[in-house]
Image (tube, rainbow, N blue to C red):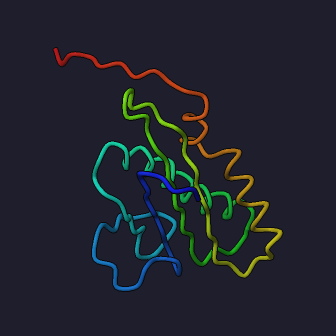
């Protein structure tokens, strides 16, 4: 990971921090939910969307492949141009605790990178339009 202005971490299962006091969100694929470590700013929420999607998709894709997953941690970092607030990019790192082979985990993480919806949407760009509340 490069030094960036903003960073978020999401984790579940055995890779959750012990005795964490903060935000824990329910999660359909894990007991105990997902721990979210971040500040509440627009920049952090932008990164959180990508990190949360990747964590979800690790569990989903592992389930489809019958790979046992004990825990997942995703760290996402990125910056923004201070003049335009355009993203300068997102980098993320995935840690997976599993009894599966390193090769199987590498294939899983690559498959997730290929299918994760939020990173895909961010890579392709989008428009955002404000509508008035009539």
Single out the residue that lies furthest toward the left: 134
- Determine which quarter of the picture holds residue 18: bottom left
Image coordinates of residue 131 in percent, x first then y, are 27, 17
Numbered circles on residues, count: 0
- In the image, 76 versus 81, the foreground residue is 81
Picture residue at 54% right of the left edge, 68% below the top: 73
- Determine which quarter of the picture holds residue 60: bottom right
- Determine which quarter of the picture holds residue 106: bottom right
Looking at the rendered image, the quarter that the C terminus falls into is top left
Relative to 33, say whether 53 is above or below.
above
* Left or right position of 8 against 65: left
Single out the residue that lies furthest toward the bottom: 19
Picture residue at 58% right of the left edge, 42% below the top: 119
Image coordinates of residue 27 in percent, x first then y, are 43, 64
Looking at the rendered image, the quarter that the N terminus falls into is bottom right
Image coordinates of residue 13 in percent, x first then y, are 51, 77
Image coordinates of residue 59 in percent, x first then y, are 60, 63
* Left or right position of 91 against 68: left
Relative to 43, say whether 62 is above or below.
below
Picture residue at 35% right of the left edge, 18% below the top: 129
Relative to 48, say whether 13 is above or below.
below
Single out the residue that lies furthest toward the right: 103
């Amino acid at each position: 990971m490069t030094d960036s202005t903003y960073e978020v971490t999401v984790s579940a299962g055995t890779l959750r921090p012990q005795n964490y006091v903060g935000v824990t969100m329910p999660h359909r694929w894990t007991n105990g939910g997902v721990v979210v470590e971040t500040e509440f700013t627009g920049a952090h929420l932008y990164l959180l969307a990508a990190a949360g999607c990747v964590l979800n998709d690790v569990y989903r894709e592992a389930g489809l492949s019958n790979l046992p997953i004990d825990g997942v941690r995703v760290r996402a970092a990125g910056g923004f141009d201070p003049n335009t607030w355009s993203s300068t990019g997102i980098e993320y790192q995935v840690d997976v605790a599993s009894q599966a082979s390193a090769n199987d985990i590498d294939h899983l993480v690559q498959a997730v990178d290929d299918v994760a919806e939020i990173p895909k949407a961010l890579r392709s760009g989008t428009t955002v339009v404000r509508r008035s509340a009539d």
